[in-house]
Amino acid sequence: MAKKSSYAIEAEEKMKKTLEHFEEELRKIRTGRPSTAIFEDIKVDYYGVPTPINQLATLNIGEERTVIITPWDKKMLEPIEKAINASNFGFHAINDGNVIRVKFPTPTLEERKKLVKVVKSMLEETKVALRNIRRDDIKVVKDQKNNSSLSEDEAKKIEEEIQDALKQMEEAAEKIYERKEKEIMES
């Protein structure tokens, strides 16, 4: 098998980063199953600095669809509770004086279908981002060809490599989407 060009390798690396970002964003989508990743987006005022909850406490998944939040500083119990209750995630935090318990409600079928639509939209945005990487990198190759830095055959081979990388990444994004859709619909 022939060695990939540096242009194709660079394009593939950018595409992989786009896929990683897609997966990271999907972790924050509520499925009905308890997840600590959701709390990364909820910020608490910690001595004047908006700080994610996961940087102020230990988060564990407990029984009965519950996340248990144990702040390292007990003074943060009330601010964390208020931040969770004020978030638009639809959770209700209960502070017992030692820990905060957040029960994950079971989403209705309608809510699950809405979440799947959101995830599908995120998939389409990811595909657009992947295609933009392809377009930009192929433009660079064409510019190199026009500047006589690359031959016609080399440029065509590199464009094919970049197109193959796009196809692989789009297939991987589809698989990631399908996993998340299944997780949402089954939870």
Image: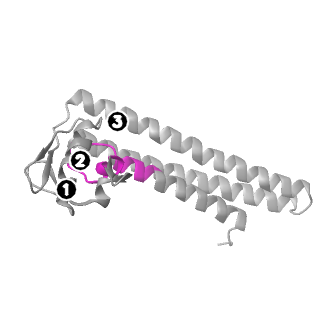
The numbered mark at residue 145 is none
Q: Which residue is mark 3?
A: 116
Residue 51 point in image, percent of width and height: 36, 54
The reply to whether the C-beta atoms of the residues labelled 3 and 1 are less than 8 Å apart is no
Q: Which residue is mark 1?
A: 75
Q: Which residues are magenta?
A: 22-42
Type of amino acid at the residue the image marks with label 2: Pro
Q: CA distance from mark 1 to mark 2?
A: 8 Å
Q: Quadrant of residue 114?
A: top left
Type of amino acid at the residue the image marks with label 3: Val
- Comparing 41 with 168, the one in front is 41
Instruction: Determine if the magenta segment contains residue 36.
Output: yes
Q: Is residue 33 left or right of residue 27?
A: left
Q: CA distance from mark 2 to mark 3?
A: 32 Å
Instruction: Determine if the magenta segment contains residue 12.
Output: no
Residue 185 point in image, percent of width and height: 25, 39
